[in-house]
Image: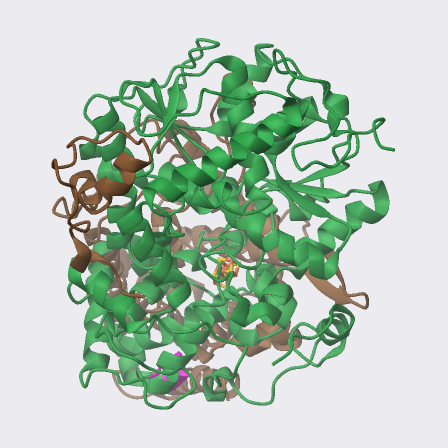
Chain colours: A brown, B green
Amino acid sequence: MRILYPFLAVLALVLISFVGAKMPGGQSLFGVVIPYLAFFAFIIFFIKKIIYWAKSPVPFRIPTTSGQEKSLPWIKQNKTDCPSSTGGVIGRMFLEVFLFRSLFKNTKTDVEDGPKLVYGSSKYLWLFGLLFHYSFLVIFLRHWRLFTNPVPSFVTKLELADGLLQVGVPVLYQSDIILLLALTFLFLRRVIRPQLRYISLASDYFPLFLIMGIGITGILMRYFIRVDIVSVKELAMGLATFKPVIKGDIGVLFFIHLFLVSCLMVYFPFSKLMHMGGVFLSPTRNLANNNRMVRHINPWNDTSIKPHSYAGYEDEFREFMVNAGLPVEKELPPAAEEPPAAEEDKPAE
Amino acid sequence: MADPKPDVLGVSVARDPSLMTGAVPSKEWMDVPAVFKPGNYCYPGKKSIVEYHSKNFPGLFGEPREWEVESDDWKLPDNWKEIIINGIKERLDKFRSFKIFMDCCVRCGACADKCHFFLGTGDPKNMPVLRAELLRSVYRNEFTKAGKILGRIAGARPMTFGVLKEWFMYYYQCTECRRCSVFCPYGIDTAEVTMMARELLHLVGVNTNWILEPAANSNRTGNHLGLQPHTFKDNAEFLLDDIEEATGLKLNSLTFNRKGAEVLFIIPSADVFAEPGIFTFMGYLLLFDHIGLDYTISTYASEGGNFGSFTNNELMKKLNGKMYAEAERLGVKWILGGECGHMWRVVHQYMDTMNGELQRSLEMPVSPITGTRFENAAASKMVHVSEFTADLIKHGKLKIDKSRNDHRVVTFHDSCNPARGMGMLDEPRYILENVCNNFYDMPENCIRENTFCCGSGTGLNTGEIMELRMRGGLPRANAVKYVEDRHGVNMLSCVCAIDRATLLALMEYWNPNVGVCGVSELVGNALIMDGEKERETDLRFDPLPGTEG
Ligand code: SF4
Ligand code: SF4
């Protein structure tokens, strides 16, 4: 169910665009209206979500320290995993965002007879996660070719690098293959590993299928079922300059591809995919471990919460304190016969 | 119910079908109810105790009442769901961490097998990711569009009594150790989620006595044991006699509530009360006498540990405030803190933020012996005794006879909070390397920032859940076993008072030949005191190597 439903959902999306793009007016609906709506929905709701997060303060400075703190000058601080300065935090965040540092630490634990716990290194998730994200990024950037004229040189360079293997006509991009491979791995991992399978939700499979759909339609268009690339570029340029035109018969595959991308854009801000923005705001990572050096201010700190006062404490225990020779602020009254005060303040046993 | 023997439990952990041993439960987790039976829950807070807290914090601790965990009527207020949902809303607005952690999990599973409770129980809901989903599912239902429209398909579910039971069960099977957070690609800290959930549970009066009563005691008497000032003093002074017996020295440097001392020393109160903490306490006293430190101990602020931190941030703040209040009253220059884990999470990450306005005349801590300025405590004015001791050793200020610890083959347990909520990893190791000849670290997956919890932190070290604790502590015990087999380790040292209580039970259970001690105990053993007698025993009156028989 958690796998089937999202799969069917993506199939349905493909079908909708397949049929829709062939209907009268369908091309402008799926080629212009929906992409625009999706794009603006993405921007607006993405920003809304960031604002929603940012509106809440960070009351306490709670970095997860993952290395030696800065303390005595002769003790070597782990500046990347336990930074104490802004520069250090930037370094930590860089490693986290661009190299998935925490995932790199991943281990896999098994229990054997004894009982004995065995920890093995487990870098697959890190590797395929990284491959997926970077190939997605490369593909995303390559698409700039469609929206720019002249095509910026970094795009052409990227294309050259991506086609380094020089196989096939048109040249095969490694990123296409890697993306699909990584997606397949991430999917299989979810299905095969019992722990993963048990925690996975439909909303974990849906984006996998959706992006797979985008990847597959894209690859089909490039290598197998060619679409009219000139018209595609014209449409893309038109979209970018707010003068969209649809000329000729682009080919339905393109509209399916574009529709899936639109769906991804709309889905993005409402889903776990927002981790893309959230990772920057995570208080266990983006704060310096300098709590004792520099005071962190909590905007809602309730100054009316005071400790149980010393005076109250002494009032309750003065007699005992005096008898035990403990210094007191207020001596006992001359005839110290009455029982200690503040009796009602004490939890009954 | 009798707790199972180690060999039985050991087989159960390794063989019983569970998500740890590869068996996938047939039902989805939302369809598996939490069932309470003797031995798997902590007793609820006594009515009188809850009343006490409610007086200080109206509403935050719910309706004081008698209730039973196994019953299906928890005597909740009629509008309890509303209280919970409003409570979530309020906390989302107050804590960005809460929002981010609710929204960003991708269920990558990196955290799944990092939790000691999952490793020991194989219970799916002890995977940090699912532990957080227990609350996240309700968040989705109430606060996200996807959850509202798609419901269960989007992983959302309404708040029900069954959910509440689940929360009570699994947010009290989390020791807020933060190990999961080290591995999460977004730093999602399930400990933080647990803190939120416990706050919420308190709002509707769902709580445990083992946390609330010590917290009430700390507030009233100054320490969690409820020792009144004279008893606290007696206990501490009693240990001076033990020191005299072991060293021949009658120390007169220990004072209480003394105004004008340079340093206020705050310990976890268990250190004056129970073995093996009392040996640690003896170690502190010998050290301070050795260097002639001008210090005093307060009976009013006689608890370093903060049981409030296991309930809500308000009570945490209230209990913590005593430290600065007392330091100011006594007019000390700075505060030195003893060996205690969660005390240091609070002192390091919360104290100055919460109660900084109470400090007025405290000064940047400077070691009167070495002149070292503790720049890392410039704002909070509080230094850890291990930082302080390491500095003394580095400057050659201690006369040490390492061989007095030769009967100990020592390893070191990084307590969760100093490790992952502070980053104090090398100071204690430096001390150990300088006070004993046989020190061996456990394997790297189990120490430093990867350290495993003792299995009983955050107020779970109560007798009624012994089996759970022994399961949760298994990963730690297992790593100790490894160095025991390899190097003959017979002493597990730590810088935490809860550890000194819980590891003791854990070692007795899984590794009966390994003892537990505080780092300062080993320091005390090794110190060559001026005018001491020929030392024949260590501080626990075990014969020193070469003197036995
Ligand atoms: S590691 Fe983080 S993102 Fe992955 S499942 Fe755990 S909490 Fe979620
Ligand atoms: S904080 Fe510790 S006990 Fe809690 S879920 Fe994470 S690993 Fe488990």
The magenta segment is: B152-157
Residue A119 on image: x %, y %: 72, 56
Residue B127 on image: x %, y %: 54, 68
Asked where in the image residue B543 lies, by quadrant, the reply is top right
Q: Residue at x 27, y 59 (%)?
A: A46
Near-viewer residue (A188 or B122) = B122
For the question of whether residue B16 can be seen, the reply is: yes
Near-viewer residue (B20 or A55) = B20
The total number of labels drawn is 0
Asked where in the image residue B158 lies, by quadrant, the reply is bottom left
Q: Residue at x 55, y 31 (%)?
A: B241
For the question of whether residue B304 can be seen, the reply is: no
Asked where in the image residue B495 lies, by quadrant, the reply is top right
A202 part of magenta stretch: no
Left or right of residue A150, residue A239 in this image: left
Left or right of residue A252, residue B549 in this image: right
Q: In the rendered view, would you say B96 is above or below B401?
A: below
Left or right of residue B358, residue A133 in this image: right
Residue B526 on image: x %, y %: 67, 23
Residue A258 on image: x %, y %: 38, 70
B154 part of magenta stretch: yes
Q: Quadrant of the N terminus of chain B?
A: bottom right
Q: Residue at x 54, y 21 (%)?
A: B250
Q: Residue furthest right?
A: B549
Near-viewer residue (A327 or B375) = A327
